[in-house]
Amino acid sequence: MRLSGWGRYPILDCRAVSPANEGELREHLKLGPVIARGNGRSYGDSALQPQATVLMHRFNHMLGFDAATGLLVCESGVLLRDVLDVFVPRGFFPPVTPGTKFVTIGGMIAADVHGKNHHQAGSFGSHVEWLDLMVEDGSIQRCSATENAALFTATIGGMGLTGIMLRAGFSLMPIETAYIRQETIAADNLAAVMDAFEDSQRWTYTVAWIDCLAAGARLGRSLLYRGEHAGRDELPAGLRDQPFTLPRGRVTRVPVDFPAAALNRWTVRAFNELYYRKGARATDPRIVDYDTYFYPLDGILEWNRIYGRRGLVQYQCVLPKTAGGEALTRLLRQIGAAGRGSFLAVLKLFGRQSGLLSFPMEGYTLALDFPVSTRTLKLLDKLDEIVLEYDGRLYLAKDARMQAATFDRGYPGAAAFRVARARSGAARVFASHQSQRLGL
């Protein structure tokens, strides 16, 4: 079948197999090279393999939960949405969540996803106690910090290239309500929003929308949203009796692909102006449900169609703190000069790094969406040069076009990862279109 990531670029003809159990999965390894695919929410080609793409949606069972410790055991194809639906009403929340709940637990571990609390909690892999991995010979290896530790480290953030994840145990954290206490800070420029991030490090969650087309004294103007899990006594009186009941959300669907001309300098500039003005007028503290705070785009099904039939690329880079605002300023100026603005532009503050191929480092990450075009791809090559100049890197879960040399310069753990794959035999069996493109 023809498959793609969430960006709908590239689209590849893949042999898709859907094992129902471990025995069938073991047989599919003989089709190699193979790669596991969860819910298809990585943006590019990291879960695509023309030879054999293994669909893991039938491995979707929750297996056990310890309310005393918060440890959840589940199969890798379980959706984060289902974890939330089952455990938020019981007073538990994932310790780290990406910006969509339509991802699988296996995908979250493979990409070592980060959230709005990375500066405090690290990435998702930091909260995984153990995982079961089917390796190249079909055997199943239990991996943890004390058992098969090298394989465990390589698998977290390893993009499915060490084996196929079957099960995992990871911790949930207790919460009192399904709501977030949110404050909004309107920042006039890049320096102001970076100061706001630094001043907000005691807050559990911080994220900023950034106007990537603002120029001059307004370059980098932003809206910083910071939040904490609300206690029951912080809720309005009408919610305190049912602190885990969410308001009925409205879900819409983008019914058609937008024309390519719909997203241009003028429409993005107009959207950004309206969005900033609206946010700047709503800076008073608010109580919002967790869906609104963490997953605003999940209420718009198939929103990727806004970018047109050719698809989109999300460009997400991280720059070390030593780069300061200089690197971000250069990136924003390059984007503004090209007129390729993104209205989904997000800035976050990162803390420490974890796995060999984990994306985060201490510094700032910028994520932007662009419609696919020749002009866009040329712009991204220029952005790569700036990122590498400041010792930054690009996120594998969002990548669809990075060059191998760019990857190698950005990931110092790449050489050790290649050695680990070669020694274990994983390189003979597990490979994605992305890993082949990057020489992994």
Image (cartoon, rainbow, N blue to C red):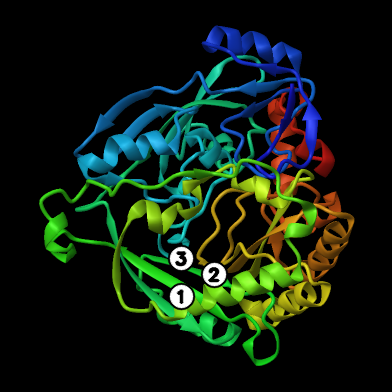
Asked whether the residues under the numbered discs 2 and 1 touch, taking CB atoms below 8 Å apart as contact, a structural biologist would say yes
**Secondary-structure class at tag 1:** helix
Q: Nearer the viewer, mark 1 or mark 3?
A: 1
Is 147 displayed left or right of 380 in the figure?
left
Report the disc number at residue 425. none
Amino acid, disc 2: Trp
In percent of the image, x 52 and y 41: which residue is there? Answer: 108
Q: Is 129 situated above or below 95?
A: above
The answer to which of 80 and 8 lies nearer the viewer is: 8
Amino acid, disc 1: Gly
**Secondary-structure class at tag 2:** strand
Q: Nearer the viewer, mark 2 or mark 1?
A: 1
Residue 86: quadrant of the picture: top left
Structural crowding at the residue carrying mark 1, measured as other residues with C-alpha within 10 Å and reported as few (<14), some (14–19) or many (≥20): some
Amino acid, disc 3: His
**Quadrant where the N terminus is found in the figure:** top right
**Quadrant where the C terminus is found in the figure:** top right
Q: Is 223 situated above or below 248?
A: below
Residue that mark 1 sits on: 279
Inter-mark Cα distance, 3 to 2: 17 Å
- Residue 148 rendering spot, x and y as whole percentages: 52, 32
Q: Is residue 397 visible?
A: no
- Residue 332 rendering spot, x and y as whole percentages: 71, 76
Asked whether the residues under the numbered discs 3 and 2 touch, taking CB atoms below 8 Å apart as contact, a structural biologist would say no
Residue that mark 2 sits on: 209
Structural crowding at the residue carrying mark 2, measured as other residues with C-alpha within 10 Å and reported as few (<14), some (14–19) or many (≥20): many
Residue that mark 3 sits on: 119
Structural crowding at the residue carrying mark 3, measured as other residues with C-alpha within 10 Å and reported as few (<14), some (14–19) or many (≥20): many
The answer to which of 57 and 186 lies nearer the viewer is: 186
The answer to which of 393 and 338 lies nearer the viewer is: 338
Inter-mark Cα distance, 2 to 1: 10 Å
Q: Is residue 99 visible?
A: yes
